[in-house]
Amino acid sequence: MVELSRKVVKPLGEEDKIFRLFIGGRGVATYVFWKLGGHRVDPLSGDNPLIIATDPLTGTGIPMSGRAAAVFRSPLTGIIGASNLGGRLGPVMRFTGVDILAVLGKAERHTYLLIQDGKVEFRDASHLWGKDAIETEEILLKEHGKNAAVLAIGPAGENLVKFASINHDIWRQFGRTGGGAVMGAKKLKAVVFVPDRQQVEVAMPEKLREFLREFTPYFVGEKSVKALFDAGTMRLVELANQMGFFPTYNWQRVSLEGWEKIAWPSFRREYFLRPGACLHCPAACHRLVESRKYGVSVDIDYETVFALGGLTGCADPDEMIRLNDLADRLGMDTISLGNAIAFAIEAAKMGKLGAKLEWGCGDLAKLVEDIAYRRGVGDILAEGVREAARRLGLEEIAVHVRGLEPAGYDPRVLKGMALNYAIGYRGADHLATMAYALDYGGYAGGPQSLGEEKVRAVAHMEEVSALFDSLVMCKFGRGVYDTYPGGRGLEIFAQLLTYVTGHKWDGKSVRDVALRIINLTRVINLEMGAGPDSLPERLYRPVQFEGKEYRLPLEELEAALKTYYKLRGWDDAGKPTNEVLKELQLDFLIGAR
């Protein structure tokens, strides 16, 4: 644990116990957040703990295991803020000897942390303050070596934009819920990890090597991994517009005219450079593209194209690349950014915002910069859609859940996502259950189903999601790990944890961890005043697609929520009962609500 205000470093304690109860990643970080009292503090105070955690599998070479998780109180939502990222951070943290880092306090002056040789140094960052996130990383890598891993914020984080990101490896981010603003409030520009080894010890190395010899060829050839290698997440642009779940014009339509221009075949023909991969991942799902018009290259994905293209009505690949590059450099979550811009365009057209904005590409780059530097209307939009709508009296057009703007899956068409967004622990969080994969894949009754079969499937996927976040594995591995002939679902993770830690794990103990994390998070959010499980007004209005009307009745979602609460053993208001908490060894939470 690092205390910036006093420049003190001390151990957290209880490491063995908490890793056994919560595995690592999001689970461990959420528990530490609770123990440090993060639920009682202002998100932009120095007392808000910023916790970055790995897990036992990180750095072992297991495919898709090289991620890290961050937890803090979100300045955007006021509840649990969390994110995870790939790149090299997770393994390099462990190669540096760090499994979990908790940062408290506020530095007296602009600071970055240097972690190497078992020590933490507090370095002056005055020469870095004001520089963009990519430039900051390049400077620090030049100074501390290319093997280092750097976390950095851009001007948006420095200016406390509520959805500012923490950036890494040029194009990777702790993107959602405003971690960059938490660092900015602490006057913490960057964290640098310099490794002193290139591997981590495991309890049963021969067993793990044997597993990897058999599993890796299967992994590379599995159909979902092949799909990722072929087109990354960009393949969803075409699917979303053909099925009609691509949100456009601030969630008023579900397909974009001219979408073919921003679908993967267009990008591949005119803009594609090469695939990119996180450390220890053969899938290489990242799509590196270049705009010759603007002279910039980015790692583009579906969510960025949906948010900066679909929501704003802009179908121009060069503009997508330009705006993506700006967001990366300035340090902002593109999902929240695109939602904020779309809200602003509609508000301006209603005469409620003092700016001339139109649907389409326009001069969106200037608005992006205005948000990062809090200039003019950008100052209002930097607060996020919920607060901007409150100030302007436009709650009826604001699309968010608990303050978090949604990703690119319309819940009127993909109804599993209605439940996903309503119960999401971060707010409208598409990765809370990954129900979009159930919906567009036709599982559990198909995309228009929200009956008991779908609710059970969504609840199961919520457990899988919590587990992946705590193993800190890429969720794109949900298919390949579940279909591997040598072990299915939770059993394969129990097997891997046993090989790596030497402790005996089985499917039940692994599922118990997932349930423990879901209930822990739920109680903390309730303690912080999380509102009811619901969706914004706009998403209950019907939408038309190819002559058919899609609607999400409130009563349908309420019935699904009732079924979900019953499955979880919660009361009718969605609160975990004392019996459930005791069963999951969460007795310390009893009475907290």
Image: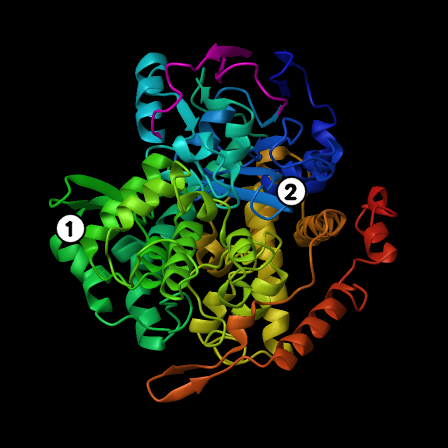
Q: Who is closer to the viewer here, 223 or 302?
A: 302
The residue depicted at 59 percent of the width and 42 percent of the height is 74
What range is drawn magenta here? 104-132
Query: Closer to the camera, 97 or 163?
Result: 163
Which of the two discs, 2 and 1, labels the residue nearer the N terminus? 2
Residue drawn where x is 42% and y is 61% of the image: 347
Give the number of the disc on residue 243: none
Picture coordinates of residue 587, whole percent (x, y): 85, 45
> Which amino acid, mark 1?
Tyr
Q: Which mark is residue 27?
A: 2
Front residue (pair 390, 568): 390
Element assignment for label 2: helix
Viewport quadrant of the N terminus: top right
558 to 381, vertically: above or below: below
Q: Which secondary structure, mark 1? A: loop
Residue 542 visible in rendering: yes
Estimate the x, y position of residue 588 in percent, counting from the top left. Answer: 84, 41
Q: Nearer the viewer, residue 591 or 322?
A: 322
Position of residue 109 in the picture relative to residue 242 (left or right): right
Residue 128 x, y percent position in the rendering:
38, 19
Q: Nearer the viewer, mark 2 or mark 1?
A: 1
Residue type beneath disc 2: Gly
Numbered disc total: 2
Residue at the spot of label 1: 271
**Classed neighbour count for the residue bearing mark 2: other residues with Cα under 10 Å, few (<14), some (14–19), many (≥20):** many
Coloration mode:
rainbow
Q: Is residue 287 visible?
A: no
